[in-house]
Every structure is written in C-alpha cells, then in structure tokens.
Amino acid sequence: MRFPWRRRPTAPLPAPDDTDNELHLARQVAYRAAHRDHPSTVEILALSEEALVDEAGYALAVRILEDVQNLTSHGLDEFRSPEDVRPLLGPRSAICWDTLTGFWNDVAEWRRHNGAPMESSAPLLAVENEELRLLLWTSNRTLPTGEKLGIADAVRYEKATGASLPEYSDLAAALRAAGSGSS
C-alpha cells in the first residue's frame, strides 16, 4: 500500500525574517523601559521619539510603545504605571501613546459588546517562565476591570470594523494640527 502523503516533498521551514527579530527586539526594549527601577527608561523612550521622526522607524517605535503600555497595564509592582510613563514621552511618542490608548479602548468596548465574556488576566500574570512572561505580558493588557485583552482581540476588531492603528502619515498630520512640526 502506498501512502500518498509520503511522496510530497516537504518544504523547508521559513527562516525568521526581520519582522520576527523586530518584534523580539521591541519586547526586550519595552520590558526594560517599563521596569520601575531601570536607569535608562528616559533614554529608551527618547530613542522611540527619534525613531518616529522618520517613517522607517515608525513601526518599531509603535511596537515598543504598545509593549510598554501592555506591561504597565498589568499593575505589577516591578513596572511603572502608565501615569509614570506618559510624562516621559516626547510629542511624537505622546501622540502615538494616546492613539494606542484610544485604539485599545475601542477594542475593549467592541469586545464587551460583540464577544464572549472576557477572562481575568490573573492566570497570565502568574506565569513564572521569564521568556513566556515576556511574550504574554507584552502581547496582552489588563483592563481596569482585571480582564485580559490581547492581540487576538485586536485582530478580530480590525477584521470586523475595518479600523486599525493609524499610519505614519496620521502621526505627521496630528503633529501639524498640534503645532509640533511636520515630520
């Protein structure tokens, strides 16, 4: 008896691309920046501000800021609070921060009205493996209610509503409107 699936050539696994490396870098940088006792938080946030000057740096800077927001949302003693981070941001980063906050608030509101009941973030916060914590804590956020909201929720929201995070051109427009410059 022949097994037809044995004749198929197996495709090689794809090599990690720059996006994978960028996501990991953003998580690592955000994890350090969000720590309450990290001495370089201001410098890290200043680098995000610099990255936002050019469209090429936009995606990485937004990922870092979003990961910092997610980490600070959990209310853990080891991380700064969102209220501690917000004043440390430059004008571009502040616009991105506020835009991210608005986007995730929209996702949470949509999720409350269109999805199954949300789960508590407590099991997520109890993870002990540091690598797994890094991945889970930066890709999920804890709402003030103690519920968890994650990337899957954001993807469902984007697919259902067509709304997504603004692009670099939206940042430039917001800066012009605020009188902070044109780039």
Image (cartoon, grey):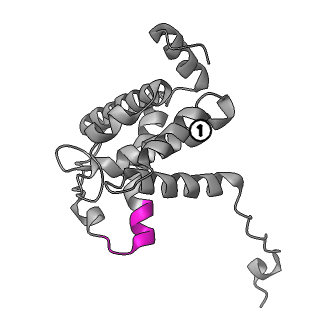
Relative placement, left or right, of 13 versus 84 is right
Query: 151 or 70, which is in the foreground?
Result: 70
Residue topped by disc 1: 59
Which quadrant does the N terminus fall into? bottom right
Report x, y in % for residue 4.
Answer: 77, 79
Tell me if I can see residue 24 in this picture: yes
Relative placement, left or right, of 36 versus 139 is left
Residue 20: quarter of image: bottom right
Residue 35: quarter of image: bottom left
Query: 91 or 65, which is in the foreground?
Result: 91
Seen at 56% across and 13% down, the residue is 181
Report x, y in % for residue 102.
Answer: 35, 28
Tell me if I can see residue 104 in this picture: no
Report x, y in % for residue 7.
Answer: 83, 79
Seen at 66% across and 29% down, the residue is 55
Seen at 60% across and 13% down, the residue is 182
Relative placement, left or right, of 69 versus 3 is left
> What's the amino acid at mark 1?
Ala
**Relative height, residue 166 to residue 25 (above, below):** above
Report x, y in % for residue 88.
Answer: 38, 35
